[in-house]
Structure formats: C-alpha cells, structure tokens
Image (cartoon, rainbow, N blue to C red):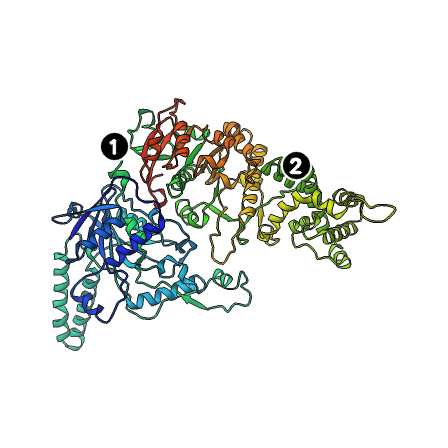
Amino acid sequence: MWYELEALPGVPAEDAAAYVNRARKAAAALGLADRPGWDSWWRLLVHRDDGMVLLADRTRRWVCLPDGVDGQVVRLVADACHARACPLEGAPEVLERRLVWAHAVFPASATLARTARDTGVDAHESRFDPADGGVVAVNVRRQGVWETRRAKNWLADEFNMAPDQNRLQETGVGACRVVAGMPRGADAVREARRAGTALGLGVTPGVAAHRSRPGFALLMTSVIMCLLAALACVLWGAWWPLAVSAPLVVAAVARMVRMPADAPVWQRPRHWWWPHARTRRMETSDFKSRSAGDDGGRRRGRRAKAYAYERSTFPVPPGTLMALAAPLARERGVQSALSHCPPELQDADGPLLGVAVDGQPVRMPAAVMWDGIALLGKPGGGKSNSMHGVQQWACAHSNPDDSVVVFEAKGVDSFPILHRLNPRMRFMDLADARTPMISLLGEGDAWVRAQRFANLMHGALGDQQIGPKSRLQLTDSVALTLRAMDAPRFAQVCASQGVAVPATWVDGAFTLLFGHGARAGRALARAMACALDDDEARETVERLHGGVNERSGRPAVSDGQLFQLLNAPMNKMGLLAGAPQLTDPARRTVTWQRLLEHGVQLAINTGDPARPGVAAMGEDARRLVNALLFQGLRLQIGESCMGWQERGRRVRVFVDELTEITGADGRDEGGNVAAVEWLRSRGRAYGAELCAGTQYPEQIGERLMSCLLGLRTIGCYAQLAPSSAQIMAAALNVDPSQIRALGEHVMCVRTTGRDNTALPALTVAVPWFDGGHGV
C-alpha cells in the first residue's frame, strides 16, 4: 500500500543519537533487522513481508509497504522521518509518466574510504535531489544469510580486521536497488549515479549506472538458446531442442510486452547466491595500513575480500534510509518563507546561491566575487555544501593560469566530493607523507630560509606568542641546523659528541631550543659549531645559549634561565617535531611561488587523513601548520600577484573553517587575523578572492568577526542560539526569528547587484551541490 510522507511543522530533534534509535526501530519494524532463517526461502518466493519501496522526486516522498503490515510499522517509519503518513488510493501519479529508467551499479573491485566509518557525522545529512521531471526509487529488502557473512569479511579486510566501527555493521542495515527515471536516458543514468552517491557509503572510486531493461536478459538468453537449437536441428536433425526453446522466446517477448512502464521500481535487489566472497588484489595502502605504515617485505599477489553484494545491490544503513525518506521541509514546510529572485540578479553570471520560491535559480554576479563571500551555519546545516558549490563554479570558470586553493577542514569526508566535482583538483594531505607538502622554508641559502620561517611563525601567531626575541631564536636555531646538516663532517662530529644526528631540520632546531633537554641541546650546538668551524656558527651558538664564563669555564647563562628564555619557540617547534611526516626528507615539497606562477587547483586537507593507515595529527600541530600555510600563501600573493587584477588573473582562496587557520591559542585571536583583513581590503589588486566559513560568529573573536561580516556576500544557515541569531540578523538586516526558523537546506543570503547596489536579504533553497547539482 502506498503512503505519502508529509513533513511535520517545526524543526526535528537535533539529537543524532535519538534520531538513529528511531531509524533502527523503523528498520526493525520493516524486517530489515531480522536474521534470515530456514523459512526465508519460502517467504522470498511466495510473499514479500520485509522492506519497502521509497519513491522520491524533488519535493515529495512516497513509500510502499508490503501488504498486510499493521499501522504500527507505518507510524514508526513516519516518526523516524519526522513526518506523517497519508494513505493513497493508488500509486503516485509520478509513476504514470512514461520515463526511461536506469539503476546504480557498484564496481566489484571498489573499496571503502574512511568516510564509511561511523565517525559521528549525522546520518540525516543524506538526501535525494533529483532534477525536475525526474524521480528516484529505492527498493529495500533484508540481507541474506550469505550476504551478512560476506559483508563482515569484506569490511574486516577494508578496515584492518576491525569492522565493528563501520556503520554498515549497524543493526537494521538493508540491501537496496537504486533506480532513477527521467524523460531522457542519459539524464536517467546521471540521476541514478547521483542517487547511488547519496547513500554516502564512501565508495572509491565511485558509483556507476546503467540503463534498466527488465526482461531483456531473459529474452536474449532465450533467443541464443533458440539459435543454438536451430543450428543443432540443421546439423544433426535434432528437432526437440527447437521445440523446447521456441516457446521460451515467445514467453520472453510476451513478458516484455506486458511489463508495465514502472517495472524497474518493483525489481527486488538481486542476491549474489555464490557463498564465497569476491576478492581483489591488495594495494600498497592495504599493506601500509596493516603494518603501521611499513610495506616492506610484503608478499605480492596477495588478495583481500571485495564487494559482498551483487553489483546492482547496495547496503543501506537505517539512518541513511530514513533520511532519504524524510520529506524536505524546506519545500513543504517553509515554502512561504522563500524569496523571489530580484531583478538585479536575474541575469547574474556567478555562483549559484540557491533556488527562489518559484524555482528560479538565484546567482550572484561574478564581479562581486572580488568582495569576498562569508558562509556561516551550525554543524550539519549545509555550509560546506554551499562552499563546495562555489568551489565547483570557481574551478569551472578559471583560466589555465588562475589558482584555486582550498583549506578543507573535513578532508576525510569532503575529498571524495571535491574529486568528483572538480576532476582537475589536486590534493595535499598534511598527515600523509605520500602527498606533496608546501615548503615552510622556501628557497635560498640557510639564513634566507630560516628568516622566512621565523617570519611565518611571527606573522601567523602574532606578537603575543612569538615576540621579537623568539623570532631571532627561531632564525638562529633553524639557520644553524640547516647549515650543519649540509656540512660533510656533521655525522662524525655528532658521534664524537655522543649526540644523535637530527632526522630533520625541525628536530635539530627543537633540540637546540632545549626540546630534548639542556644537555642534548648544548651537545648538539657544540657539534654543529665544530662541524662548521667558522665564526658565524660560534656567534650563533653564543646568541642562542649564551657565552662561557672565562674564569670558571661554565656557561654564562644557567640551564634554568635558558629554559625560560627558549620556552616560547621551543613549544612551537615541539608541535612540528611531534608530526615528523610534515618535514620527512623523502616527502616531495613545493613552494607557494611555484604553484601561483603556473596556476593550480589545490585542496589541502587540514582535518583527519583521507587514506586508511595514516595516523592523524594532533589538533595543536594541525592548527599551527594551517596557520603557517595560510600566512605563507598570503605573503606569496603579496610578492607574486601584484597587478593580477589588471591582467585578468585570479587566485581564489577558500577556507572551510576560519578557526583552523587563525593561529589563535585561546588567549589572543592569532596573527592571521591581519592576513584575512589584508585579503579583504587589499587582495583585489592582487587578484585575490576570499571565501571563508565558520560555524558560529562568536567563536572567531570580535576583530575577525567584524572583518568576516563586512564582506559583500554573506550566507547564513539556521542559528538556534539566540546570541548567534542576533549577530547574524544584524549583519543581514533581518529579524532574529527568521534566522532561527530557517528550515533544512535553506539559507538567508545578502549580496549586491552588478552596480554594487546593496540588495535585501534573500531566503533561498540550496541545491545539493555535493550530489552534483547546481554549478
């Protein structure tokens, strides 16, 4: 029986744990949590009593439940979707249209990325957003007895024998077939691929799609059998195979003729009846993850478990299923709050901001990009989705010599999306030594590189964290280390002094700053001075550690006093020394200068690693490196990009989370606040365009908040906290209640027209850019 799900008024509960519990109860009521038994074969053949069919267009949701289910099942499904179920007399009218259908296909050798783990991301972020005139259908059933065993083995191989952390091991995970219908076949294939991606399984490299032709395989098989039978009759005179196969052809043709137009919707997810799991060849990353990053001595040719289901069958967790079934409140519940597209934006040629109440796209003028974009919203509100839409537009409308630099705080979740949206995008993972790294030293001799690094530290962190004295100490320690590591006798002298040779320049500078104790620091300084054997090295050591008392022969400055003097730079270098992969000598490095000169589309992962088997960096070290990289980019823009605006060149900078790059330590706002202000006030002459986001305005400090909210284009998702809503309402010149009442995937945005005329704030429905819509 068919039911239409209608969104209930109000905002659903924000508690993710409660939402998941409701989804699991609904999945259990649908039979998705039942363990298949000996009678499952008979029930599979004679009567369907598990799962459901979900039908979705852009604004509405319908579900078809098996005949005979009680009202309790319907109520649990509706509660999990924050909706009410209205029974229908017949099938939805969308199934009466003549559509071309396609279904999603999972590559048999595909692997799961870390996004498939249960990382705490709310499951209700998943959604369908088919194009106008299209429809998506999901046919769900319980898993088979062999599928559950194969799935566990597959996940164990993907996640180092620990599959319990994967959300595909939740209670109530079903098996589904995803199909999409559109007037044109190519559009149907595209929508089916997007719908498969919406499940959020973390599939690498991605989901494919094929045209659906129910009954065609049976027809082709019967035709081939008939041809072989005819050949046997001609060659050997055996007539009975032809008499048997000819009726099969007639039956197959009659079946295809009588098949309704919506037959793909009712096709159950196929079983892969073979009890043994598929296998795939293990990659280098598999061996590295099993051996803590060391792939030495691995056995080539070893195979791992592969995809556990039939290729057109997808696993679907209960939270994701109920999220996809939830009607879009932005279309049904807050439609009256959406704005009309103003005349000043009707012919705009910039990024797509959203959709107006009448379905008309609302874009901002491309020229307004010079004045910057600010995006704010609570976690899961859609801020990253909007930023990905602007990034996709920027990459698609860039010249070959333009640059796009993205500081992505959720790389583990966003990198697959960015790779799909922007195929030319290159990726750099701070924690992964297999990816390139931006040089923190740059080019030049030892003193030039050391001074550049000290300037980066001072500019990124500010005077309160790195003062003039700390700046000189950083310069001396880094320069001395760089010079000594190039000296031919350095290793021999270190051995004679009983001190280990530093693995990297960071480790050497950290040791000189007493990071490993006063004894090790002084011994390494003596070894460096002896290896270099020049006045410059001895003067550097004296500036760092003080001279020697001529009478007693002891250090003029005690160890305790030096600890206090070197404490600030030592702590910062200690953060870098705690992440040796950043300055691994085997890691490829590139400078900002080279990147900007040649033009690059680069995404920098500042969050959790995107590849399995890579240890995550500490939060303090990650924020320090983010601040150094952002400061280095800002300085290089000032040095290399003068006059870019006049020449039509651009460097577009995207910062997903401002708190990650400011260099703040909890006591001050950090030195990179000045870098953000420079990009806002002077970046236009250098071709720089800034798009930055954060969750709440209060968490970035008054100075940075004033700079961010002073940008010409500001987009805000729902802010439930009264203080946050008050700040954003004042910036957008609307009532605070309007900010608090914004629905899901709805944004209040303020921008300007081509003539720099300030426009009133607009309320728009934001497309699902992460799924491939918009641009």
- Amino acid type shown at disc 2: Gly
Residue at x 43% of width, y 67% of height = 303
Secondary element at image label 1: helix
How many marks on residues?
2
Q: 56 left or right of 451?
A: left
Q: Residues within 10 Å of mark 2 (few under 14, many from 20)?
A: some
Residue at x 46% of width, y 28% of height = 710
- Is residue 444 at least partly visible in the picture? no
Secondary element at image label 2: loop
Residue at x 48% of width, y 50% of height = 608
Q: Is residue 738 above or below residue 557?
A: above
According to the picture, the residue beneath numbered tag 2 turns out to be 467
**What is the spatial separation of the Cα atoms under label 2 and label 1, in whole angstroms?**
55 Å
Q: 586 left or right of 402?
A: right
Residue 403 on image: x %, y %: 49, 38
According to the picture, the residue beneath numbered tag 1 turns out to be 336
Q: Residues within 10 Å of mark 1 (few under 14, many from 20)?
A: few
- Amino acid type shown at disc 1: Ser
Q: Earlier in the sequence, mark 2 or mark 1?
A: 1
Label pair 2/1, CB-CB below 8 angstroms: no
